Amino acid sequence: MLDDAVKVRRGKRLEGVSRHFDHLSGRTVKGQQILTLGLATQETFLPLDSDLYISSKGAHPLKADFHDGRSVEARRYADARDRTKPELAADMLRRAQRQGLDAEVVLADAWFGTKTMIKTALDLNLTAILRMKKNTMKYRLTTWKDGAQHTQLLDAQGLYRHSVRKHWQTLKGMPYQTSCLDVELSLERDGEVEWIPVRLLFVRGLNQDADGPGGANAWALFLSTDRALSPAAILEFYALRWSIEIYQSWCLRTAFSQRCLRTRRPQRRVASVPSDAGHGVVRAGAPTRRRRPRSAIDADPRARLGGLSASLCAAS
């Protein structure tokens, strides 16, 4: 799974500092942004790789040039400065696979819900489960009426009004209502446009405060590149993402983060970190054989979805 976090740093002489939009505070801040790749299971979370991302806005220059521009530090600093976040994320996923990581699914929030990330996941033989923004990205919806096929290009809001608004279904055993749509998304491959099948999952809560961020009048959108996954399975997989949120919060409060941010290259050393806010540390598990993501998870979904409510309440 992938996530990013911003450490606010205002020093005028600090290296690697630039302006970033902090979605937690809802404003642009000056600081250093850490992009993290981690492995999550039902029991553990293990950080695998991290990179600094330096935006082009308000970036602080280096105090001095590198002694050797071919060094690892110099090359990774150039990547952090010159490459986009999706490109950095793709490099991290490829490095993990080269090291023998046998993962099935890549999870990420709406800041990674882009065609670039979807294409990267498919190229690496991964199932992408992403939260999507309610932006102008177009999806191709095919419907049948009176024996005739009708095709429409609609964005998220258009799909909601056309096919979702009056077709909610309560998810058994969970405090959510969902609506599933199988659509197609255009990706550019080798200069040609290819339409790939994806599943869109619209989700809203059954909160008494219907107008609140997690209430019945608010909804979130998720995308899966595997149409065989049920709504419950998609939400159960995405609930695993809460572990990286806890890890990022822990990192930003500890000396581990300070050590990463003071150096010119991110730390790649794997650390043992709390698996939740109160207890436990994680350990690396044995690699597993590649298999298709299961449509049902053995663990109790109500216990597994503790972090999903917070994810649904986050701004998309």
Image: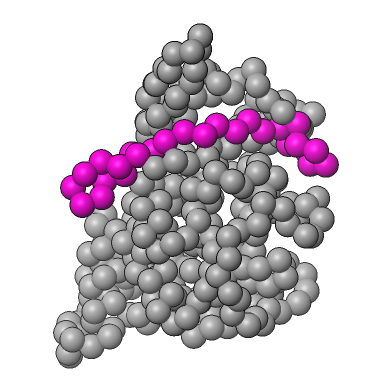
In the image shown, does 278 or 100 lie closer to the viewer? 100
In the foreground, 72 or 22: 72
Above or below residue 26? Residue 261 is: below
Location of residue 93 in the rendering, given as x and y in whole percent from the top left corner: 42, 69
Report the residue at 77% width, 70% height from top.
278
Q: Residue furthest front?
A: 147
Q: Residue furthest top?
A: 146
Q: Is residue 2 visible?
A: yes
On the question of residue 213 being in view, the answer is no
Q: Is residue 311 above or below residue 299?
A: above
Segment tinted magenta in the rendering:
170-195
**Is 111 above or below relative to 200?**
below
The verdict on residue 209 being magenta is no
Percent x, y for residue 190? 21, 52
As rendered, which of 255 and 170 lies closer to the eye? 170
Q: Residue furthest bottom?
A: 67
Q: How many marks?
A: 0
Q: Position of residue 157 (x, y in %)?
A: 48, 25
Residue 312, quarter of the rendered image: top right
Q: Residue at x 64, y 17 (%)?
A: 166
Left or right, 193 with reference to 316: left
Characterize the magenta stretch by its predominant secondary structure: strand
Q: Going 76% across and 77% down the picture, which residue do you hit? A: 280
Q: Is residue 185 magenta?
A: yes
Query: Which residue is pictured at 22% across the width and 64% down the height?
Result: 82
Q: Quadrant of residue 122?
A: bottom left
Q: Give the side of residue 142 with respect to residue 214, left or right.
A: left
